[in-house]
Amino acid sequence: MRSIIVGCGRVGAGLAETLARSGHEVTIIDHSTDAFRRLEPDFPGAAVRGDGTDEDVLRRAGAEGADWFFALTEGDNRNVLAAQLAAEQLGIKHVVAKVNDPVRAQAYTALGLATICRTTMLVDALARFAGMPGEEGVQGVAMPTAHHHHDAPEAVAAGTGAADDRVTPARVVGEEV
Amino acid sequence: MYVIVVGGGKVGYYLTRELLAAGHELVLMEKDPGRARQIADEVGSIVLARDGCEGKHLAEAGANRATIVAAVTGDDEDNLVVCQMAKHHFDVPRTIARVNNPKNEPLFRHLGVDEIISPTRMILGAIEQDIPVHELLHLAQLQGGELEVIEAQIAEDSPAIGRRPTDIDLPDGCTMFVLIRDDVAQPITPETSFQAGDKVLAITRTECEVDLHRELIGEASTASAV
């Protein structure tokens, strides 16, 4: 399994270590070499300095033909761009974008992108901790509610929510993440 | 016609002024409150200090009745998100994105952005007309950038020399339409035999440019200098 991670923050670095140690061939990309200090000195993967929203950089990092792609920078829009490059231009099947704005996260699941939203997850976890039932249907990674971005407009225009219109996810994210 | 401009940098600012002068109804969205106030002081209360990447703010700006949304911030990723939101959530008929990295053009087009303006490519085109950086000159874009009119210079070492048009393996969707030899334009006929110094004008799909380069100029990368 080959995995590409864009963004070497705490989440990116942590995921890189976990995947690399369970046998994935991991390449992590960040525009700052300082960020790579978050990796263990004996990190068994590759670290590439560059802009993860630049198609050339992604290709040079060997993203084409990768099995997994995780866009985990601090910028929602950068993640959305990187993830769509990965899915549409580089043909990567399993793509996830971290989108911390819940509204935008939901919008992009409706456009065919798997997203993970820190805000929603934290709110849900803390509400549960405080004894509340939590929000229904909150999951780690929100799967796309349309196969492809071209499928989305009808669903959105018709005002059908994510839950009403669920189809089999095009990009499945399994338990190993 | 109602226009929403997103991004109050230099481009957004002058665009707003020009559109206002032409009598269009518009709103400028600029997320930095200081910059928004500064522009509002000059052009009036058509500036909304909101982030145009967010659906609820686009709704506030009246995106559902906008004819055009122009995303002209300095960041490609923000411009993409604005256009995708406008297109897919508000059914805006025409979305325009400024793109800095020309490599992002195919993706933006594929994701449904209607018009893509790349200042980088435009300036590159202007420079190439004077100094041939590549041996392929980009003369014009057609069909919203899907097709390109190019000029290929046949050099001494070109694989096309001595060959006829039918011997050349042109990519699909690519047509050579005129030859310039000794400053005289002439049609390309089945009898034409290419010589060093010829200039060939062709229309090609953007993605076939590499194949066309290989056939008319040779294997060297399009990025190599003369």
Image (tube, coloured by chain):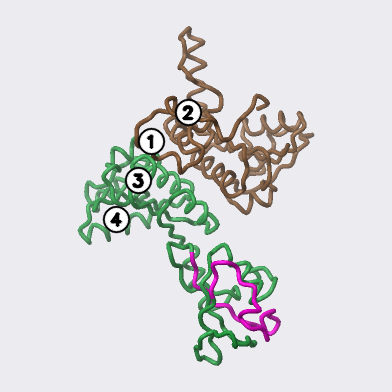
Chain colours: A brown, B green
Q: Which mark is residue A156?
A: 1
x then y, percent, for residue B194: 63, 86
Q: Which mark is residue A50?
A: none
Secondary element under disc 4, as helix, strand or loop, is helix
Q: CA distance from mark 3 to mark 4?
A: 12 Å
Secondary element under disc 1, as helix, strand or loop, is helix
* Badge 3 or badge 4: first in the primary sequence: 4
Secondary element under disc 2, as helix, strand or loop, is loop
Q: Amino acid at mark 1?
A: Val
The residue under label 3 is B30
The residue under label 2 is A166
- Dot 3: within a 10 Å radius of its alpha carbon, few (fewer than 14), some, or many (20 or more) residues? many
Q: CA distance from mark 1 to mark 4?
A: 30 Å
**Mark in the foreground, 1 or 4:** 1
Q: Are callouts 3 and 4 both on one chain? A: yes
* Discs 1, 4 touching: Cβ within 8 Å: no
What residue do we see at 64% from left, 49% from top? A58
